[in-house]
Amino acid sequence: MKQQILALSLAGIVLALASCSDDESTVAPPTPNPSTDRYVNQTTGDDANSGSSGLPWATITHAVATADSEITIHVASGTYDAAGGETFPITLKNGQTLLGNVANKGAGLSPTLVRGEGPYTASALVPGATIVGAQDARVAGFSIRTETSPFTYTGIAVDGVDMEIDNNTFLFESYSGVTSGNGANVDIHDNRILTESYGLYLDGSRIVIVFNNNIEAGSFGMRCYGIDSLHVANNVIGTTNVGVQWGSGTAGVIQANVFNGSGFSNGAILNHGDNLVVRGNWFNAGPGVQVAPGSGVPDVGAVASPGQNNFAGIVGVGLEHNGSGTVMAIGNVWVNTPPQVGVDIVITGGGSVVTE
């Protein structure tokens, strides 16, 4: 994510997302620049080399420390861990692009695997990470996991900087895939996220764009508290507890996602705050939208802007309202037409739901 994203309004983010292709075959790495790009090969490289394509380095740790800012570092397939000489967390410089096997998201028969963790003491964002990001940096084309699955350690820490994270596979052994905060701006797209607890932990970020990811985290797809502008679009999300958890943010849009799985114990979308818009999602597991007690209410559809959410695939409750206030949910598809209170919609607090 580059500096210009700071100027994007929420409407601009929507337009930018609409222009993105869902066809992953169009994803291609940038054309290498032999005069500036650097190379890493765990099998054939040596950190005493120059880092050129013909004389690659052996470790990512050495590459990011030695290469200048604004440099693309190409990483060959292999396992990059402490046994191979890596020191964790691997901390990028501003503008560096770490590029592995983008086409296969760092996975496949010959994965580009970064495996390890180390303490992160620069701030209170996380206690440890595999990779620590930097301003205008990008990480793409890797399988990423911690070594011993320590509690709250993350695959990539984005601490108060702007960053793009795409076409990676975050493996189960990590507590979370990406953790961002302290005013970070993140563009997270086209990843597969299989982490142990949280896919994305985004509290305290500024502008967050999450699109075209497959999120199959153990418990929580993503947690989003205190975010200035959130747009979650075109993802496939299947977890056991919550798909997207929203709270106390300035503006959030959850749009055109598919929520799969055997069921979400606390809702495919769990609303804890105000200012959330829910549009055009497809729910195959429920509860679809759950409103927490004492929270604000989401906008699930209005007369001027129908929700176009499809709750018909849910065996159970489409919308569960446990708070107060009125949830507008006009222009959606339910199992029953019109939706039945006590079946499609459950109200346990003092609130109400308007569907037509």
Image (cartoon, rainbow, N blue to C red):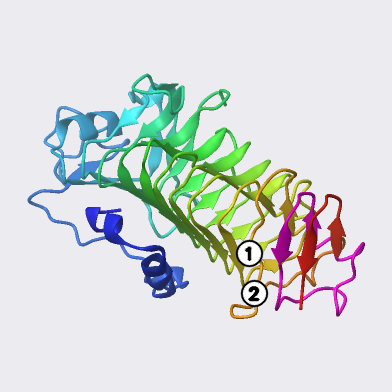
What residue sits right under mark 1 in the picture? Answer: 299
Give the structural element (helix, strand or loop) at label 1.
loop
Residue depicted at 42% across the width and 23% down the height: 124
Q: Quadrant of the C terminus?
A: bottom right
Name the residue type under label 2: Ala
Q: Say if the magenta span includes residue 321.
A: yes
Splitting the image into 4 quarters, where does residue 64 fall? top left
Residue depicted at 59% across the width and 39% down the height: 198
Residue 146 in the image, given as x and y percentages of width and height? 50, 30
Give the structural element (helix, strand or loop) at label 2.
loop
Magenta stretch, residue numbers: 317-344
Of residue 279 and residue 45, the one placed in the foreground of this image is 279
Q: Which mark is residue 222?
A: none
* In the image, residue 61 above or below residue 73: above
Of residue 224 and residue 2, the one placed in the foreground of this image is 224
Q: Is residue 218 left or right of residue 344?
A: left
| Label 2 crowd (10 A; few <14 / some 14-19 / many >=20) | some
Residue depicted at 20% across the width and 62% down the height: 31
Residue 136 in the image, given as x and y percentages of width and height? 25, 47
Of residue 122 and residue 254, the one placed in the foreground of this image is 254
Give the Cα distance between marks 2 and 1: 7 Å
Callouts 2 and 1 close, C-beta under 8 Å:
yes
* In the image, residue 216 above or below residue 119: below
Residue 341 in the image, given as x and y percentages of width and height? 89, 66
Q: Is residue 163 left or right of residue 294?
A: left
What residue sits right under mark 2 in the picture? Answer: 302
Splitting the image into 4 quarters, where does residue 95 fall? top left
